[in-house]
Image: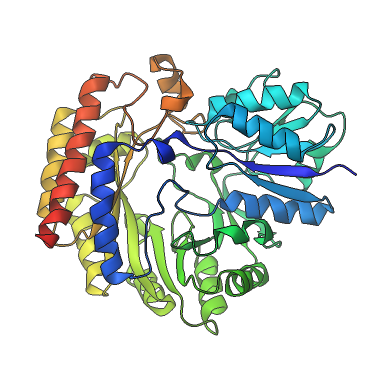
């Protein structure tokens, strides 16, 4: 009987991190541990468990398909990946791969070799749209579910599977719980667990890799309970949970479900992410009731007109600061998801952003720092594709220079401005440890 192998490939950024960001995240880890003593940043390992593995495992269980997990996140080369996969698989077995940009070329190299060796390779994830028929047996584009994966694994169906989504809140509920049985080796090696009460997002930010869904799909409350029961059984020492919903509060039902699940499961603490427009008193009250300790907010630029042209809505910088103060007033920490490398960034926008960050330093605890990568599912990708000059996917990294020519800056200048943001945040955090 054939086995389906779920594969986690390595990332270049894990073994070759950017030096300025390394220094920043050393301070980040030290500061974070003040509030969360159990927090740490794994060295040369994934920061989190690959949650997609738990999702796919559960779907395969629903289909009655035997699965295995090949964790190659520490592998050093394509040859090592191929050798290990050839050893654990047999001709006719399916091999599921979900790469990001920086390990996409690696995924294609491994897939072609496995395909030639008689394996059925199935490629999904946000880069899958760039694969060609010769690269992989099957391509899955979109959010995969039970029926979609059944079709993709059916013998003799080598083709592209495009899964459409309808805008709005889906009437369908996800009733299966992710299965973590292949991921028990991560116990004690990751600082937090990730939990989703919903998948997708209804906002339409043109630079966001999740805006493609246009849809919000909720997880059934009983499925959430089964998932959290696995947390307690398999990862009993890890009590910090990151709520992976792209916008906490976008669905009142999802929030109610989380409150219901954790009402009789004490001891957990939470980090959530949300949109500034979703931060109202009702949502803040729900965060407090749940036990949220830190709130992440996307902040890409102080140029609100530029952001509006890219689909990111706000009510201006005064309102943004007011929302930061409201979060801080509830006793929760503010963490910004700060993005550089935007296609329409200008010198003026950067200057305004730096000034605003300094002005709000009393409210900003930390920032997660990313440089923009034009993933194919980003809504702005069609407009940016002709401007891409670097198709070496190993360099499509959120800690590396942009691979396209921005509209108002050179790529080199864009990278310099990102590093200035890194320097600013490094200084702000370092000043607390002087």
Where is residue 120, by image quadrant?
top right
Q: Residue at x 83, y 29 (%)?
A: 157
Residue 112 versus residue 261: which sits nearer the camera?
112
Where is residue 32, by image quadrant?
bottom left
In x, y percent, where is residue 53?
63, 50
Residue 233 versus residue 262: which sits nearer the camera?
233
Name the side, left or right, on which 12 lies relative to 7.
left
Residue 360 visible in image: no
In x, y percent, where is residue 245?
49, 57
In x, y percent, where is residue 23?
24, 46
Q: Residue at x 40, y 17 (%)?
A: 388
Name the side, left or right, on which 152 lies relative to 287.
right
- Colour scheme shown: rainbow
Q: Is residue 358 above or below residue 261?
A: above
Q: Is residue 63 above or below residue 227?
A: above
Residue 277 versus residue 14: which sits nearer the camera?
14
Q: Residue at x 47, y 33 (%)?
A: 378
Question: Looking at the image, which residue sits at the far bottom?
Answer: 264
Residue 269 versus residue 431: which sits nearer the camera?
431
Q: If the image is split into quadrants, where does the C terminus sit?
A: bottom left
Residue 131 visible in image: yes
Name the side, left or right, on which 380 lies relative to 36.
right
Q: Residue at x 24, y 27 (%)?
A: 414
In x, y percent, where is residue 208?
42, 40
Q: Is residue 290 above or below residue 276?
A: below
Counting labels gives 0
Name the side, left or right, on which 339 lies relative to 6.
left
Q: If the image is split into quadrants, where does the N terminus sit?
A: top right
């Amino acid at each position: 009987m054939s086995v389906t192998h779920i594969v986690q490939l390595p990332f270049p950024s894990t073994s070759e991190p950017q030096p300025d960001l390394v220094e920043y995240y050393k301070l980040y880890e030290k500061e974070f541990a003040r509030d969360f003593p159990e927090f740490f940043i794994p060295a040369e390992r994934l920061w989190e468990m690959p949650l997609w593995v738990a999702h796919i495992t559960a779907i395969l269980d629903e289909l009655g398909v035997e699965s295995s997990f090949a964790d190659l996140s520490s592998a050093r080369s394509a040859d090592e990946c191929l050798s290990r996969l050839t050893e654990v698989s047999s001709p006719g077995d399916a091999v599921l791969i979900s790469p990001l940009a920086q390990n996409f070329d690696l995924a294609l190299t491994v897939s072609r070799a496995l395909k030639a060796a008689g394996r059925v390779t199935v490629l999904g994830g946000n880069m899958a749209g760039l694969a060609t028929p010769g690269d992989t047996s099957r391509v899955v584009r979109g959010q995969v579910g039970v029926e979609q994966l059944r079709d993709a694994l059916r013998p003799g169906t080598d083709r592209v599977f495009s899964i459409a989504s309808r805008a709005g809140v889906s009437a369908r509920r996800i009733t299966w719980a992710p299965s973590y049985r292949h991921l028990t080796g991560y116990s004690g090696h990751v600082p937090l667990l990730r939990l989703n009460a919903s998948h997708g997002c209804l906002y339409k930010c043109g630079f966001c890799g999740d805006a493609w869904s246009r849809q919000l799909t909720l997880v059934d409350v009983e499925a959430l309970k089964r998932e959290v029961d696995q947390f307690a059984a398999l990862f009993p020492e890890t009590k910090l949970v990151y709520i992976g919903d792209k916008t906490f509060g976008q669905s009142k039902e999802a929030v109610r479900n989380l409150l219901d699940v954790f009402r009789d499961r004490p001891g957990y603490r939470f980090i959530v992410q949300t949109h500034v427009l979703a931060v109202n008193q009702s949502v803040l009250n729900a965060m407090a009731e749940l036990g949220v300790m830190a709130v992440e907010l996307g902040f890409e630029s102080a140029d609100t007109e530029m952001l509006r042209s890219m689909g990111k809505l706000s009510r201006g910088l005064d309102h943004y600061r007011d929302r930061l103060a409201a979060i801080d007033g509830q006793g929760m920490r503010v963490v910004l998801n700060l993005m550089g490398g935007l296609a329409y960034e200008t010198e003026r926008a950067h200057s305004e952003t730096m000034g605003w960050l300094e002005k709000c330093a009393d409210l900003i605890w930390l920032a997660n720092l990313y440089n923009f990568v034009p993933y194919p599912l980003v809504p702005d990708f069609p407009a940016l594709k002709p401007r891409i000059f670097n198709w070496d996917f190993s360099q499509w990294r959120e800690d590396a220079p942009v691979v396209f020519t921005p509209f108002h800056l050179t790529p080199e200048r864009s990278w310099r401005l990102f590093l200035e943001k890194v320097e600013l945040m490094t200084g702000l955090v370092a000043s607390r440890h002087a």
